[in-house]
Image (spheres, rainbow, N blue to C red):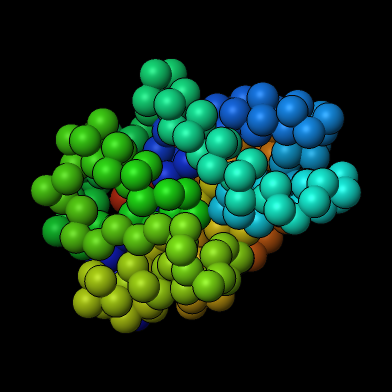
Amino acid sequence: MKKSAVIFDIDGLLINSEPLWNKAATEIFRQYGIQLTDDQYAITTGLRSKEFVAHWLHSNKVPHTEFERAEQKIITLALDLIDKEATLMPGVEHIFQFFLQRDFKIGLATSSPALLIEWIKDKLGIRSYIQSSCSAQHLLHAKPHPQVYLDCAAGLHVNPLECICFEDSFYGMLAAKSARMTCVVVPSAEQVKSEKWGAADLKLTSLQNFGALHFNMLND
């Protein structure tokens, strides 16, 4: 089916916010005597904060009564850090112009809070271009469940098969593919050679590298 819409993840794809989420989590987790390695953070990249916090607090035998409190502390600190320190990933302007020139409908689908969606719209000056934006923050299921992508496609009034999704996380890729969408992954440098990206339709090292040949291949 010919493509007519593109949906972007946010964290780690459009902005370099993953280290800032980790920085916030490190600060709050320290209050519970928890210290994670880079490899442990990588395991839960792409999950929303609710599942991320529950996973590590439960693993470290922290009472369930602390889960929501810790999550809110991390979200508040992370959004503050993102506002002060986040920068755009390479190729963001290029990729938006590429699809705008082809009259594609554009959506955003993230596991992060809706506040981050509003922030990125203003940061990139793309508010008028975004026709559907969805956060999995309050959905029953988040990535790797496809609901946030299906909701975004519904907001764009397109069939999921008409969508190209751009993701940087393994859970995000699974969500996009479960929604029966075409998925382009742009993993972090340390994960780009991993075999776990095999389900993706295309793997790139940067959004800047996406071009007409890739588009024609995906749209065939």
Figure label count: 0
Asked whether 126 or 28 is in front, the reply is: 28
User: Can you give x and y, in whole percent of width and height, for residue 1 in the image?
Assistant: 34, 80
User: Can you give x and y, in whole percent of width and height, for residue 105 in the image?
Assistant: 21, 62
Q: Quadrant of residue 94?
A: top left
Residue under the image location 57 percent in, 36 percent down: 74
Asked whether 69 or 149 is in front, the reply is: 69
Residue under the image location 47 percent in, 23 percent down: 81
Q: Is residue 121 left or right of residue 26?
A: left
Q: Is residue 98 left or right of residue 165?
A: left
User: Can you give x and y, in whole percent of width and height, for residue 13 in the image?
Assistant: 46, 41
Residue under the image location 44 percent in, 54 percent down: 110
Quadrant placement of the C terminus: bottom left
Asked whether 73 or 110 is in front, the reply is: 73
Asked whether 141 or 197 is in front, the reply is: 141
Residue under the image location 53 percent in, 72 percent down: 140
- Does residue 84 appear in the picture of this structure? yes
Q: Quadrant of residue 80?
A: top left
- Is residue 129 shown above or below 153? above
Q: For the view shown, which residue lies furthest in the left direction?
A: 128
Q: For the view shown, which residue lies furthest in the top direction?
A: 85
Q: Is residue 135 left or right of residue 154?
A: right
- Does residue 46 appear in the picture of this structure? no
Q: For the view shown, which residue lies furthest in the front direction?
A: 65
Q: Is residue 112 left or right of residue 127?
A: right
User: Can you give x and y, in whole percent of width and height, for residue 107 in the image?
Assistant: 29, 58
